[in-house]
Image (tube, coloured by chain):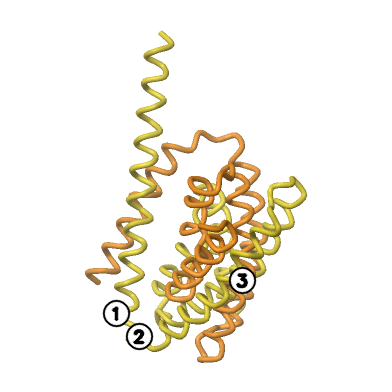
Amino acid sequence: LDRRLSLGLLGLIAGLASGLLGVGGGIVMVPPLVALLGMTQHQAHATSLAAIVPIATVGAATFAAGGEVDIGIAGALVAGTLIGAPLGARIMAGVSETMLRLVFGIFLVIIAVELLVG
Amino acid sequence: MSGAEIIGLAVAGVAVGLLSALMGVGGGVLMVPLLVYLGETQHLAEGTSLAVIVPTAIVGVIAHRRRGYVRISDGLLLGAGGVFGAWAGARMALGIDAEVLQRGFAVFLLLVGLRLVSRSLRARRAEGEGQENAS
C-alpha cells in the first residue's frame, strides 16, 4: 500500500476513535507508525501528537457545535496540564517505568469495570 | 464555577499532565472518567476533554520539534485523514445515547489498561531474564 495512503487511512481511523471517545487517538496511531512505517518510538509519539492537534480541534469544534464543551472546565484543566505535562516528561527520564505502568494499568482496568457496572 | 472549583480542576490538570507523560497515555483516557466522576455527562466529558487536548498537544509538539522528533509531512497526512474521522466520530458520538457511549468508552479504557499491564509484565520478565543471563 502506498505510504501516503496508509498514513491518511491510519489518521482516519485514529480520528474516528478520537471523535467517538473524546481522546487524542495516539494509542491508535503510535503502534502502526513504529511497526509498519519504521518510525522510532520517539518519532511516532511526536508525529502522532502533531496529527492530534487538527484531529482534536475538529472533534472539539463538532462537540462544541452540539453544546457539549464546557469552556470554563476546559480552561481550568489546561492551566494544570500545561504545568504537569512538561514536568512529567522531565521526570520520566529518570524513572524505571514498568512497576508504575503495571499499577496504573490495573487502576485503569478498575475504572473501566466500575464504568461498565456502575 | 467557584474559585475553589477552578483551583481543584487546575490541580487535577497537573495530575493528568504528569500521569499521561509518565505512563505514555493520552490525557483523554484520564480526563473523560474524571469529568464523568465529577458528575458531567459522557458527551460533555468527551467534548471538554478534546478541548483540553488541543493546547496541550500544541505545547507538546513544540517541545518535540525542538528535539527533531516530529515528521511534519507524515503528521500532516495523518491529520488530513484524521480530521474527517474526527468529524464523523464526533457526529456519531453526539447521536448515541450517553449510557451506550459510556459503555463503549469503558471497553476502550479496559483495553488500554490491559495493554499497559501486559506490556509492563512482559518488560519485567525481559528484565529478569536479562539479569539471569548476566549472572
Residue under label 1: B100
- Residue farthest toward the front in the current orientation of the protein: A1
Asked if marks 3 and 1 fall on the same chain, the answer is yes
Name the chain letter of the residue that bears numbered label 3.
Answer: B
Residue B82: horizontal and vertical position, in percent? 55, 70
Residue drawn 55% across the image and 73% down it: B50
Q: Residue at x 49, y 48 (%)?
A: A36
Under mark 2, the amino acid is Ile
Q: Amino acid at mark 3?
A: Ala
Outermost residue, top side:
B135
Question: Of the numbered discs in the image, which one, if any, rests on residue B80?
Answer: 3
Q: Can you tell which of label 2 and label 3 is closer to the viewer? A: 3
- Residue A50, image x and y in percent? 65, 61
Element under label 2?
A: loop
In the picture shown, does residue B42 fall above or below B71?
below
- Rendering coords of residue A72 (x, y %): 60, 81
Amino acid type, residue under disc 1 in the picture: Val
The hue in which chain A appears in the rendered picture of the protein: orange
Mark closest to the chain's N terminus, 3 or 1: 3
Q: Label 2 marks which chain's residue?
A: B
Q: Secondary structure at mark 3?
A: helix
Marks 2/1 in contact by CB < 8 Å: the verdict is yes
Name, please, the residue furthest toward the left.
A117
B39 lies above or below B115: below
Q: In 3D space, how far apart are the residues under numbered discs 3 and 1 (Cα atoms)? A: 29 Å
From the viewer's side, name the closer residue of A105 and B115.
B115
When asked about the image quadrant of residue B57, the answer is bottom right
In the image shown, does B1 or B87 lie closer to the viewer?
B87
For mark 2, what is the residue?
A: B96
**What is the drawing colour of chain B?**
yellow
Of the two numbered discs 3 and 1 in the rendering, the one whose residue sits closer to the viewer: 3
- Residue at x-position 63% and y-position 70%: B54
